[in-house]
Image (spheres, helix red, strand yellow):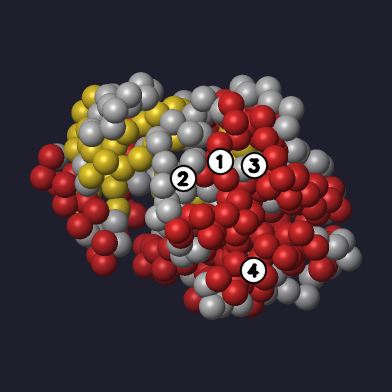
Amino acid sequence: MAYDLSSRGYAVMLYEHPDFIKNIEGIIELGGIEAVETVPGEVNSPKCALSGFAEVTATADVRTAVEHADILFMIMPSFGQEIVFKLVMPYLRDGQLLCLLPGNCGSLVFRRMMREAGVRANVVFAETNTIPYACRTIEPGRVFVLAVKQGMGIGALPGSESDRVAEDLEPILNLKLFPHKNVAQIALNNPNMVVHPATSVLNMGVFESRKGSFYFYREGMSESVCKVLQEIDNERMNITEGLGLGRESFFQHTKQYYDFDFKTIREFAEFSPIHSSFGYDAPTSPRDRYISEDCPFLLVPVFEFGKLLGIRTPVTESIITIASIYNDTHYFQTGRTLAKLGLEGMNKEQILEYLD
């Protein structure tokens, strides 16, 4: 994203947490980011969607980064969001927009953190349900961008700002943004929760044994596994419908993103021209973000909202349970519960009012 925005004329500053400063040393040395045309060392490398060089300033000084921008994009695994926002929070100012890509209800956590810390900056939050790019980091300072989505969903906190935020960010992100009612609707429509956790849980034996030498989508999402994925999608849609937030299927999302017209999840896994293009792409352990991010930060909120609404989610619950065993944790407690979202004790109507 830093490369893309800078290449199109925006003044971009890329922030990295001081503990991971090695990730930006290459960018500092190069003076920017190179989008390479092919994946080095890969035979029959797929064609890139973006290539070239763009000047980008990178820093590990959070105050410098936050004060630089009117619009802050936070793009990272959900387990890093609170860590970084705690550093960001003291330097926020009125009128800034902070957009999380994807959000996974992170903005609700941030509002709770601001309330508890007494931070009163008038900041609008936005969340998307995916990131714009299918991409890989080759090395610090060099990226390979395989594809750019043609559209994605967005919602704001407060929800009354969703249409305005979509209108403001659409030319910046250079893709179609579909405004949603609120950030909960966006988070509950992240398709990663449908394909990543269950496929990882049900294939973990072969993932570990082959050390990731396996096609996650084409092989891992077999016909039988896809039956489980479809049930997770059904349970997820039951929750969104129960909240009065409609029923958007996995297929509607892939249509928005890439204009795919697949009729089954298995068909998507087998024939997507993008999702098996990087060669072997399976996780090597249950610590991979397909489980460590998508179970606690996506599936747990589905389960939590289901409990609130009295809607059962047995397949979702079973995947969370097995994933918790794999990682010697208790995702039902450590994940994004309603309490962590600042929604504990509210009923459905109160939650919707709060989101608006």
Quadrant of the image containing the N terminus = top left
* Label 4 SS: helix
What whole-number distance in Å separates the C-alpha atoms at marks 3 and 2?
Answer: 12 Å
Are discs 2 and 1 less than 8 Å apart at CB?
yes
Task: Count neighbours of disc 3 (C-alpha within 10 A) and say few if under 14, some if 14 to 19, many if 20 or more.
Answer: some
Question: Which residue lies under the disc numbered 2?
Answer: 214
Query: Is residue 78 shown above or below 321?
Result: above
Q: Amino acid at mark 2?
A: Phe
Task: Count neighbours of disc 1 (C-alpha within 10 A) and say few if under 14, some if 14 to 19, many if 20 or more.
Answer: some
* Label 1 SS: helix
Question: Going by the image, does 310 lie left or right of 304?
Answer: right
Q: Residue at x 75, y 38 (%)?
A: 249
- Of labels 2 and 1, earlier in sequence is 2
What whole-number distance in Å separates the C-alpha atoms at marks 4 and 2?
Answer: 21 Å
- The answer to whether residue 176 shows anywhere in this view is no
Are discs 3 and 4 less than 8 Å apart at CB?
no
- Of labels 4 and 2, earlier in sequence is 2
* Label 3 SS: loop
Q: Nearer the viewer, residue 47 or 177?
A: 47
Are discs 1 and 3 less than 8 Å apart at CB?
yes
Q: Nearer the viewer, residue 240 or 299?
A: 299
Q: Amino acid at mark 4?
A: Ile
Question: Which residue lies under the disc numbered 4?
Answer: 322
Question: Which residue lies under the disc numbered 3?
Answer: 222
